[in-house]
Image: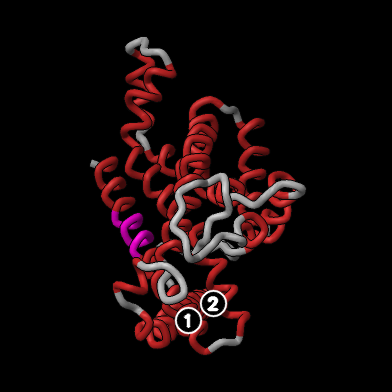
Amino acid sequence: MSAGIPDPAAPLTPTGNLRRRQVFSKMTEYSATIAAVIAVAVLVIVVFSVIQRGASALSLDFVFTAAPTGIGPELLGTAVIVGLGMVIAMPLGVLIALFLTEYAGNRAAGPIRLTLDLMNGIPSIIIGLFIFGLLVDHKQQSGLAGSVGLAIIMLPLIARGSQEVLLLVPSSIREASDALGVARWRSVLGIIVPSALGGIVTATVLAVARAAGETAPLIFASSLGDPSKFSLNPLEALPNVPVRIFTLSEEGNPEGFAQAWGMSLVLISLILFASLGARALLARSKRKMAG
């Protein structure tokens, strides 16, 4: 062979550059593994600490009765506030996802995705201030105001999660529908949305789990609820678990600390079970669409 031209029949030999790439690849793999182990370890430590300190407070009376010994009104108020927030955020999030995947062009989709990502990164304390100025200032606190704040937190999560699931629907389904002359809106409502329904529900559940523990918006919107009274009226301030945990943690009372840990255990258990159920539902949805 002439100078400068490698022999294709010659055996491959490692070079310094190849060895550097192999070392860098191994370092990256080990670093990622260590980071994952640290994340899981932190979660285990947090959950173990909450269980250790809050298990002693759990009982049927604690869960189903009112203050001063129970948290029933707080659980009911949290369910009402989070449920209304989901009712507000889910339709809007799914419609935004449908617009991005089915109707928007690249020029329109880019700014909307950027807006959703920015909304997802807004600190919850700023959302709480916004809700206070919009719905509470010079008026009265209400569960509905808290629901709107949580809906703002849920909206980008539902929209982005639903968008990713809708993109998993095979394009052949859309093409077959177009070939048959089916109107786009009928194709979306009758074929595409049902195919991705499991993933949309999963995104919604994950968003609910994310928002259920938010405290800042509820401090501004629904922190004056009476913990000794059960209420379903969203037009008045509703007692809720996150605000009650915050209040008890600031009192400096050992009995209050025990209640706060018990409420934390109940809340983290609900969030954990909701997240695990959502993951299982998402995996089932992906298998269904792949099949």
Tag 2: amino acid: Phe
Residue 106, horizontal then vertical, whole percent: 61, 32
> Is residue 1 left or right of 176 when viewed as pictured?
right
Tag 2 residue: 24
Mark 1, secondary structure of its residue: helix
Q: Residue at x 51, y 75 (%)?
A: 28
Quick one: quadrant of the C terminus? top left
State the extent of the magenta-drawn residues as a range.
273-280
- Expressed as whole percent of the image width and height from the top left, the position of residue 172 reads 34, 27
Residue 286: image location, x then y, percent: 31, 47
Outermost top residue: 181
Q: Is residue 80 magenta?
A: no
Q: Is residue 26 visible?
A: no
User: What residue is shown with label 1?
Assistant: 42
Question: What crowding class fits label 1: few (fewer than 14 Cα within 10 Å), some (14-19), or many (20 or more)?
Answer: few
Question: Relative to residue 87, is residue 281 drawn left or right?
Answer: left
Position of 24 relative to 223 (above/below): below
Residue 119 vs residue 141, the one in the foreground: 141
> Can residue 168 be seen in this snapshot?
yes
- In the displayed structure, does residue 57 sit left or right of residue 227? left
Q: Is residue 264 above or below residue 3?
A: below
